[in-house]
Image (cartoon, rainbow, N blue to C red):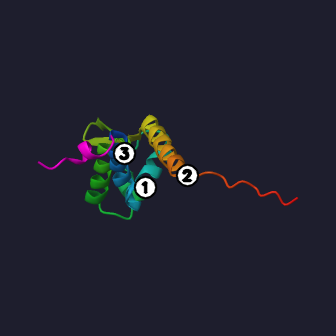
């Protein structure tokens, strides 16, 4: 019986890959930036900010919500979205940890020219 991804890879990498998939579209990144810039929940104006159809914006918001990057709060007939700052901080730390393990984010040491 074949193994699933969660059985093959470490849990932290599986979770990070899921978030990376959610972030792997410029429209979702732009939505995340727009929500974060408001520093409060954003409801209807997101569609007006984007060069995308309402249904596409809704699909992107769903992806961000499923990844835990935003929360949707129902406010009457609409849903208001807020960034999950804790999740974003955890994702940033996880990527920083990964990059540190890869050795690609170390500052180059200044050579001694003396």
Residue closest to the eye, 45 or 86: 86
Quadrant into which the C terminus falls: bottom right
Dot 1 or dot 2: first in sequence order is 1
Residue 71 seen in render: no
Residue depth check, mark 1 versus mark 2: number of the one nearer the observer: 2
Which is nearer the N-term, disc 1 or disc 3? Answer: 3
The region drawn magenta spans 1-10
* Horizontal and vertical percent position of residue 55: 25, 58
Identify the residue position indicated by label 3 in the image: 13
21 and 30: which is toward the camera: 21
Q: Quadrant of residue 112?
A: bottom right
List the residue tagged with mark 1: 29
CA separation in Å, label 3 and label 2 = 17 Å
User: Whole-Å distance between the Cαs marked 1 and 3?
Assistant: 21 Å
Kindly identify which residue carries mark 2.
103
Is tag 3's residue or tag 2's residue first in the polypeptide sequence? 3
* Image coords of residue 98 (percent x, y): 47, 47
Image position of 4 with respect to 87: above or below:
below
How far separated are the C-alphas under marks 1 and 2?
26 Å
Q: Is residue 74 left or right of residue 91?
A: left
Which one is in front in this view, the residue at disc 3 or the one at disc 2?
A: 2
**Mark 1 neighbour class, 10 Å CA radius: few under 14, some 14 to 19, many 20 or more:** some
């Amino acid at each position: 019986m074949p193994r699933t991804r969660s059985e093959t890879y470490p849990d932290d990498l599986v979770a990070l890959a899921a978030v990376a998939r959610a972030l792997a579209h410029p429209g979702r990144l732009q939505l995340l930036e727009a929500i974060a810039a408001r520093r409060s929940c954003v409801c209807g104006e997101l569609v007006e900010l984007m060069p995308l159809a309402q249904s596409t914006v809704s699909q992107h918001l769903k992806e961000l919500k499923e990844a835990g990057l935003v929360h949707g709060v129902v406010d009457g007939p609409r849903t208001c979205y807020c960034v999950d700052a804790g999740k974003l901080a955890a994702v940033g730390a996880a990527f920083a940890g990964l990059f540190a393990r890869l050795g690609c984010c170390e500052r180059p040491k200044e050579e001694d020219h003396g």
